[in-house]
Image: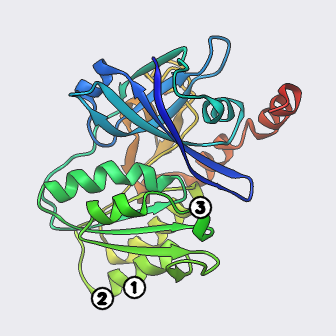
Amino acid sequence: MKILDKDVLADHQGVRIVRLAIQAPDIAAKARAGQFVVLMVREEGERVPLTIVQADPGKGTIVLIAQEAGLTTKLLAGAKAGDSLHSIVGPLGHPTEIKKYGKVILVGGGVGIAEIYPVASALKNAGNHVTSIIGSRTKELLILERELKEASSECIIMSDDGSYGRKGFVTQALKELLEKSTYDLVYAVGPIPMMRAVSTVTKPFGVPTLVSLNAIMVDGTGMCGCCRVTVAGKVKFSCVDGPEFDAGQVDWQELMNRNSIYTEKEKHICRLTGQ
Ligand code: FES
């Protein structure tokens, strides 16, 4: 799987986010909004899930966006056009249900903005009024502003430090919108604390709220159990049952604990390999 193009979307305060165009005709032919791939950068490496941000069946290409977090994403961010990935499997997961809901709010935090983009485009094309709220810690880390503006009926920008758009968290803007009008769906992707906060904000308004979970994955096909989450008291696998779930039913504390389980090992491996 050849990397055709790579560009750096953000590189600031130790956070680097890259966009990669990859030759993957079979995946491009079938991918739908909300689905993901699992890739390996090299044979002895781990497998990481990444949302399919764009797919062009005509050219046979897909676009992925990754933020450097552990060794694999650092290797991916360091790859150049012309390099090849060891493997890529997809499209995986249930696609987002695209239909006419009416008024929809999409909330994207950090690299989660990349994941709401294909859903925003598809929902707008299906005739919905799409309001996107996108936010980052600071101006330099905001990605895909132009794309989200094009894919939305309106787009609200937030930054934690007030350096761009409005100062504050995405949940603040979300609460204000819900207080002013009625909405038919909220869809959120971002860091776990953000998605958890979104579910707390929407609950009193009774608006259906979906989140796309970024659980740790290995096989991506329901066999290893690594991506286990508890939803409405039942064990679910993010890869085959999700990645989208009802935000109000997710056991957020468990997800947070499971996702941080390898943090120290990741740091150790990065130190050992000089990455
Ligand atoms: Fe293995 Fe989901 S990644 S069961």
Secondary structure of the residue carrying tag 1 is helix
Question: Is label 2 in a helix, a strand or a loop?
Answer: helix
Q: Which residue is mark 3?
A: 141
Q: Secondary structure at mark 3?
A: helix
Q: In the shown orientation, is residue 127 left or right of residue 44?
A: left
Estimate the x, y position of residue 268 in percent, counting from the top left.
Answer: 86, 32
Residue under the point 21% across and 28% down: 58
Q: Amino acid at mark 2?
A: Lys
Report crowding for label 1: few under 14, some 14 to 19, many 20 or more residues within 10 A (C-alpha): few
Instruction: Tell me the kind of residue under disc 3.
Output: Leu
Which residue bears the numbered disc 1?
176
Q: Quadrant of residue 186?
A: bottom left
Task: Name the disc covering residue 222, or none.
Answer: none
Q: Can residue 237 be seen?
A: no
- Counting residues from the N terminus, which is met first, the one under dot 3 or under dot 2? 3
Percent across and percent down for residue 94 are: 30, 35
Q: Nearer the viewer, mark 3 or mark 2?
A: 3
Q: Earlier in the sequence, mark 1 or mark 3?
A: 3
Instruction: Estimate the x, y position of residue 146 in percent, counting from the top left.
Output: 37, 62
Q: Whole-Å distance between the Cαs marked 1 and 3?
A: 24 Å
Whether residues under marks 1 and 2 lie with C-beta atoms below 8 angstroms apart, the answer is yes
Q: Which residue is mark 2?
A: 180
Q: Nearer the viewer, mark 1 or mark 3?
A: 3
